Image (tube, rainbow, N blue to C red):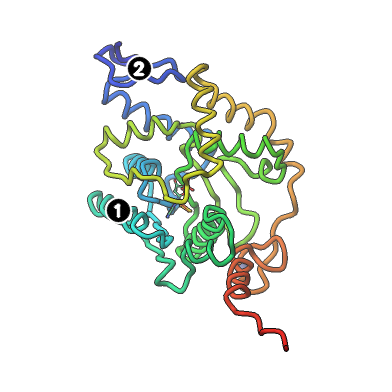
Amino acid sequence: MKCTRCRAPAEVQLRAHNAAFCRPCFVFFFQRQVERAIESERMFGRGERLLVAVSGGKDSLALWDVLAELGYDATGLYVGLGIGSYSALSHQKAAAFAERRGLPLRTVDLENEGGLAVPAVAQVTRRVPCSACGTMKRHWFDAAAIDGRFDVLVTGHNLDDEAARLMGNVLRWQKDHLARQRPVLVPTHPRFVRKVKPLFLTSEYETAVYAFMRGIDYIVDECPNAAGATQLVYKDALNRIEAASPGTKLAFVKEFLRAAQPAFAAADRDPPRDCERCGMPAYGSLCAYCRLVDEMQRRATPRASAPA
Ligand code: AMP
Ligand code: FES
Ligand code: ZN
């Protein structure tokens, strides 16, 4: 197999792109693909300050690497969710990467900074950990972006994440979620910044290969709460479809965004108001994070026992 660009022996084959690459050409192809997504979706420009949410995993570290290589002003944000040794190791990976590349990293540690750690919230509220975790991550990403006066919040969601999420949303016809499943979300509230996903057309396999070729040391383990998550079932189903019909994931996400998403977006709910307690964006009187905090307090306070 020869490299599609330079005819040298190829090291990686991408069936969805009907292409194969040697190492230097793959690195070039990957960075170019991310740059093209940024430009064609008008995600951000050179003069803007980016806050890149990095989990210590391959996608977000590969993305941070590309953004730094392309010359963007990109600061990392790591949120310590308090998930035992998984959080400790993922923080180490993010911090070591930042140090090696001389890139600035901000850290929010939920256990030590007055926040709530994911396991405690999941236990007390009896929510699925990933659902509590999602609410908390969104809150701290938004808060960190606003507090640090960043223009854009960047996450490492890849094609596999987006295709699995789309499948879940379609299977249940979650119109409100479909209305907001886009690679660029413009702020609908003064305390939101623009949110973008430059890897939305880049597969997990491609980011893994890129991270390997660039010598990026990332946390390989999945979050221990992920086992059994429906998202993984969808990913598995999509991988089987992809193996039988390469390019399906890419077409699924791309065609949704082109042909169907605008109709859902047009029927979206009203923009958020201010949370009555903390001022962050809220779709009721309180934002999702303050509701979570309330629920924690309600459940943690033992009810007065009924009189005999
Ligand atoms: P996940 O929700 O784990 O699939 O991660 C999706 C994206 O969210 C990652 O690519 C990161 O950009 C971001 N992210 C996830 N976990 C963290 C974390 N603990 N700290 C900062 N960013 C995170
Ligand atoms: Fe949030 Fe696993 S990363 S529950
Ligand atoms: Zn609030």
Question: Which residue corresponds to mark 1?
Answer: 103
Cα distance, mark 1 to mark 2? Answer: 32 Å
Q: Report if the CB atoms under discs 1 and 2 are less than 8 Å apart.
A: no
**Going from the N terminus, do you reach mark 1 or mark 2 first?**
2
Q: Is residue 127 visible?
A: yes
Q: Is mark 1 within 8 Å of ligand 1?
A: no
Mark on residue 119?
none
Q: Is residue 1 above or below residue 301?
A: above
Within-10-Å neighbours for mark 1: few <14, some 14–19, many 20+:
some
| Quarter of the image where the N terminus is located | top left
Q: Is mark 2 within 8 Å of ligand 1?
A: no
In the picture, the quarter occupied by the C terminus is: bottom right
- The residue under the point 61% across, 36% down is 166
Q: Amino acid at mark 2?
A: Ala
Residue nearer the viewer, 185 or 253: 253
Residue at figure coordinates x 35%, y 17% from the top left: 20
276 and 231: which one is in front?
Answer: 231
Query: Which residue is at a point 61% across and 61% down the rendered structure image?
Result: 190
- Quadrant of residue 22 within the rendered picture: top left
Residue 6 sits in quarter = top left
**From where the camera sits, is residue 52 visible?**
no
Instruction: Give the labeled residue for mark 2.
Output: 20
Name the front one of labels 1 and 2: 2
Measuring from the top left, give residue 273's x and y in whole percent.
70, 63
Of residues 162 and 243, the one drawn nearer to the viewer in this rendering: 243
Q: Amino acid at mark 1?
A: Leu
